[in-house]
Image: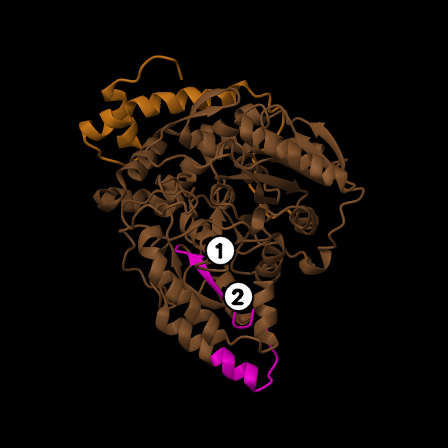
């Protein structure tokens, strides 16, 4: 994922792939937040997780 | 609640009188506070009369016999609508109780009603356009946030409209309203209390727990609620200790790690000063206080967003496709946003989660509890969007959850309690974080602090 702004067509495609049919107005409304969220999520790629497996079993005891 | 239970058991007061007094207070004050969505007048009074009959017959009593309480409106209650703070589920009437509601009833507690909350528990401010924004009782002039998502639980307990309540906590939703409303709230260890019959926000991050005026009351409620439940796959088989017996009032030798860096540096000056003063109070009582920093805090926001967003969207996807117009627009917007979180983001968030848990475990390896602010700020006005933190400005939403959500990721128990007031009379909250399944030590430290201070006994002035 890059730092580039996300255009409406990309949002349409992403929503469609996720199974949603949102209007252009609804997508435009969330566009700044989508961009900000994806920027924030990139922090996850900066973490050296090593061999850490994802937490998938929550019952600790 | 402990005192009420004792007075009822010794017949100093009737459960009918207690329940009626609370219902009268709700009728008088709640139109201005908006802490309840549904009040169970008739069933509460009927239960109180039955409790009185049992009492007078000399039959065995549960630990909460005749004591009223209220539930955040995401706990299923048989025959009583459970809305999740939404219009979408506005007419939903469950057929059976959530496990914890049934357990509290079995302990003798009487349900007063269902409490206001952020729609589907998705937000920390405590706002709800469907049922009204719960009002923080500590400022009669300015409509301030109650904190969320368990906003009604915070307001009802702080205002004396319920002696105790249950909240739920996915990113801080028990501890944030506890902090902003000046009460005590416990997020137990993940797996300690059953989530069965509780509407989810994010299954792997949701915790349920008590909100009361004191740590001792939290201990009483937790003891009645906790324990293995085959209906919750994450429920622990560990035995439930006697939390009340752990409250010795003694913190001599208790090792307390004051969380600096991300926590104290990020707190507003008044909050920082109050938490540092709390550390001094504990030290003077014999606790061994040192300072510690957690290393993985900078990625907590990203990991939490990936996990909560993805899980919340999975739960809401179908409703969002068919009934989005009935959602709070702000909640719908955030759910839509989650459609752009990838599977890789989610898994990476779960990998980071393990690192955050190890980070907290390491800090607790040579300490019994960690001490930090619950929220970096006190209750903002409901129109405020920006907050001044110790390390710069931030939007109110991210500020409110900044110090609480690390322990949703890690699953450690955390108890929020009042530790001061601003010059303007708004409560300041701190949290004590303990080792997994060591709620007893967390509650012991919180109770000891409350024996040394009077912040938890102060009450807002209500009309």
**Total label count?**
2
Q: Secondary structure at mark 2?
A: helix
Q: Residue B400: x and y, percent?
A: 46, 34
Q: Which mark is residue B19?
A: none
User: Toward the viewer: B375 or B206?
Assistant: B375
Q: CA distance from mark 2 to mark 1?
A: 10 Å
Furthest-right residue in this view: B253
The quarter of the image holding the N terminus of chain B is bottom right
Where residue B277 sits, quadrant-wise, is top right
Furthest-bottom residue in this view: B57
Residue drawn at 46 percent across, 57 percent down: B160
Q: Is residue B462 above or below residue B101?
A: above
Q: Where does the magenta region start and end? A: B50-73
**Colour seen for chain B:** brown
Q: Residue B367: x and y, percent?
A: 74, 37
Q: Which mark is residue B166?
A: 1
Per the image, the residue denoted by label 2 is B104
Q: Which chain is orange?
A: A
Q: Residue B170: x and y, percent?
A: 48, 42
Task: Let me know if marks 2 and 1 both belong to one chain.
Answer: yes
Q: Residue B41: x and y, percent?
A: 36, 70
User: Toward the viewer: B287 or A35?
Assistant: B287
For mark 2, does the 10 Å Cα neighbourhood hold few (<14), some (14 to 19), or many (20 or more) residues?
Answer: many
**Is there a contact, CB below 8 Å, between mark 2 and mark 1?**
yes
Visible residue check, residue B378 = yes
For mark 1, does the 10 Å Cα neighbourhood hold few (<14), some (14 to 19), or many (20 or more) residues?
Answer: many
Residue drawn at 59 percent across, 58 percent down: B217
Q: Is residue B363 left or right of residue B48?
A: right
User: Toward the viewer: B309 or B283?
Assistant: B283
């Amino acid at each position: 994922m890059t730092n580039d702004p996300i255009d409406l067509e990309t949002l349409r495609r992403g929503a469609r792939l996720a199974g949603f049919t949102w209007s252009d107005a609804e997508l435009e409304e969330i566009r700044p937040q989508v961009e900000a969220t994806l920027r924030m999520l990139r922090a996850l790629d900066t973490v050296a997780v090593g061999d850490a497996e994802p937490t998938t079993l929550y019952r600790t005891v | 609640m402990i005192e009420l239970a004792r007075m009822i058991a010794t017949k100093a007061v009737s459960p009918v009188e207690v329940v009626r007094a609370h219902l009268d207070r709700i009728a008088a004050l709640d139109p201005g506070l908006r802490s309840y969505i549904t009040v169970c007048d008739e069933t509460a009074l009927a239960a109180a009369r039955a409790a009185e009959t049992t009492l007078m017959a000399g039959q065995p009593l549960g630990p909460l016999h005749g004591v009223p309480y209220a539930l955040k409106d995401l706990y299923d209650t048989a025959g009583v609508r459970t809305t999740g703070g939404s219009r979408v589920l506005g007419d939903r009437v469950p057929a059976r109780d959530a496990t914890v509601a049934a357990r509290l009833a079995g302990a003798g507690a009487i349900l007063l009603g269902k409490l206001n909350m952020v729609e589907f528990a998705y937000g920390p401010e405590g706002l709800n356009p469907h049922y009204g924004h719960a009002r923080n009782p500590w400022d009669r002039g300015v409509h301030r946030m109650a904190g969320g998502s368990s906003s009604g639980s915070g307001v009802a307990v702080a205002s004396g409209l319920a002696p105790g309540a249950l909240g739920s906590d996915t990113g801080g939703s028990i501890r944030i309203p506890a902090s902003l409303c000046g009460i005590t709230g416990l997020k137990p260890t993940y797996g300690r209390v059953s989530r069965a019959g509780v509407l989810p926000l994010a299954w792997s991050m949701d915790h349920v727990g008590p909100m009361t005026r004191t740590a001792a009351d939290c201990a009483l409620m937790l003891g009645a609620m906790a324990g293995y439940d085959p209906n919750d796959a994450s429920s622990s088989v560990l035995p439930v200790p006697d939390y009340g017996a752990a409250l010795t009032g003694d913190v001599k030798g208790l090792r307390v790690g004051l969380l600096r860096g991300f926590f104290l540096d990020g707190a507003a000056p008044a909050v920082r000063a109050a938490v540092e003063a709390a550390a001094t109070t504990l030290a003077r009582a014999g606790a061994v206080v040192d300072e510690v920093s957690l290393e993985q805090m900078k990625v907590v926001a990203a990991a939490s967003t990936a996990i909560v967003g993805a899980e919340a969207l999975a739960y809401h996807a179908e409703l969002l496709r068919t009934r989005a117009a009935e959602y709070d627009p702000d909640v719908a917007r955030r759910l839509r946003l989650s459609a752009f979180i990838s599977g890789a983001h989610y898994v990476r968030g779960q990998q980071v989660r393990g690192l955050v848990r190890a980070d907290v475990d390491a800090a607790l390896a040579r300490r019994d509890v960690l001490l930090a602010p619950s929220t970096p700020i006190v209750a903002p006005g409901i129109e405020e969007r920006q907050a001044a933190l110790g390390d710069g400005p931030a939007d109110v939403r991210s500020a409110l959850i900044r110090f609480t959500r690390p322990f949703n990721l890690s699953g450690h128990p955390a108890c929020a309690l009042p530790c001061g007031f601003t010059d303007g009379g708004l409560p300041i909250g701190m949290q004590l974080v303990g080792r997994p399944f060591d709620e007893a030590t967390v509650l012991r430290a919180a109770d000891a602090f409350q024996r040394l201070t009077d912040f938890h006994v102060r009450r807002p002035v209500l009309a």
